[in-house]
Image: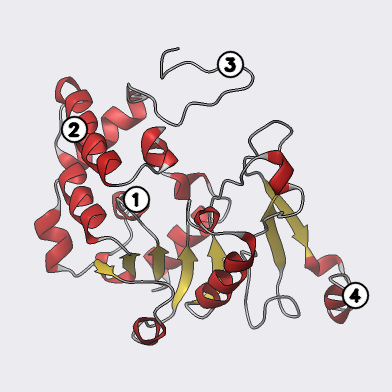
Amino acid sequence: MSTNEFDENTISFYINEPPINQDIEIFFANYASISPSALRDHLVSVREAAWQRHNYSHLGRWRFLDFSIKQNPIYEEILKQCKSKGATVIDFGCCLGQDIRQLIYDGVPLDRIRGYELDPFFIEQGYELFRDGELMKANKIFTMGDIFDDQFLKTIEAADYLYAGSFLHLFDAETQKDVCRRLSRLAKRAIAGRQLNSIREQSVSEFQCIVISLKEQFYSHADALVGIYPEPGDCITSHCLTLDLNQLDERENIANTRS
């Protein structure tokens, strides 16, 4: 079977050819000055180096070319607040840093963006992918760090928004709770992300949900909660579900629904 094929029982975590479309060509031409004719070989070279480092499915399946932050329902708010209101954003577990480049491409000032990644190799590969190493280093956009390092977390100034794409699903269900608690300390206004759960049998008991409106507290003062819910199939994928809390008369009732 080709690595570009899959049947009803098999999903390939490695796809040979990059899913290049016009939007991707325009982005790399404008941001990285890479011509469409040279783009395919450039992407393959960087992806192969990253894949050899770690077989993450989002590398094997080219998901880093989705620029997932742009697809998030809170993205337009992040852009508006960062560009005109001085808000800041953190991308935690940023890997190649594609979502940070999307923010920059869409006009967010460099001094309002920070990225944190456990493995400095991926930060360097991001410089290679987007050909912006000098600019990123000069502005200290990226920092190596471990979400489980308490001393490191104390050095991070909380941002208005925190994005964690393809990050939570790297941990088991119990560890995810600890990760979420740690991430919550780094966001003043909202947390957003895109995650992938595991096979259906595990997902039933390990349902993932992301709160993306925090405000003063997780539940009692939020305007809305947005989570992910499973799509039928062997592999659970993320979809957005919004609960408007403004429709409730008493915010205290929210906490009771969790018990």
Marks 2 and 3, the one that precedes in the sequence: 3
Figure quadrant of the C terminus = bottom right
Q: CA distance from mark 1 to mark 3?
A: 38 Å
Return the mark for residue 106: 1
For label 1, count other residues whose C-alpha is less than 10 Å away and answer few (under 14), some (14-19) or many (20+). Answer: few
**Nearest-to-viewer mark from 2 and 3:** 3
Marks 1 and 2, the one that precedes in the sequence: 2
For label 2, count other residues whose C-alpha is less than 10 Å away and answer few (under 14), some (14-19) or many (20+). Answer: few
Q: Secondary structure at mark 3?
A: loop
Marks 4 and 3, the one that precedes in the sequence: 3
Rendering coords of residue 124 (x, y %): 18, 54
Instruction: Please identify the quarter of the rendering in which residue 23 is found.
Output: top left
Marks 1 and 3, the one that precedes in the sequence: 3
Q: Secondary structure at mark 2?
A: helix
Q: What's the amino acid at mark 3?
A: Asp
The answer to whether mark 4 and mark 3 are in CB contact below 8 A is no
Please, is residue 63 above or below residue 190 in the view? above
Question: Residue beneath label 3, please?
Answer: 7
Question: Residue beneath label 4, please?
Answer: 249
Q: Determine the residue positioned at 18% across, 25% down.
A: 41
Please, is residue 258 above or below residue 163 in the view? below
Question: Residue beneath label 2, please?
Answer: 45
Q: CA distance from mark 4 to mark 1?
A: 38 Å
Rendering coords of residue 205 (x, y %): 76, 53
Q: What's the amino acid at mark 2?
A: Ser
**191 vs 175, nearest the viewer:** 175
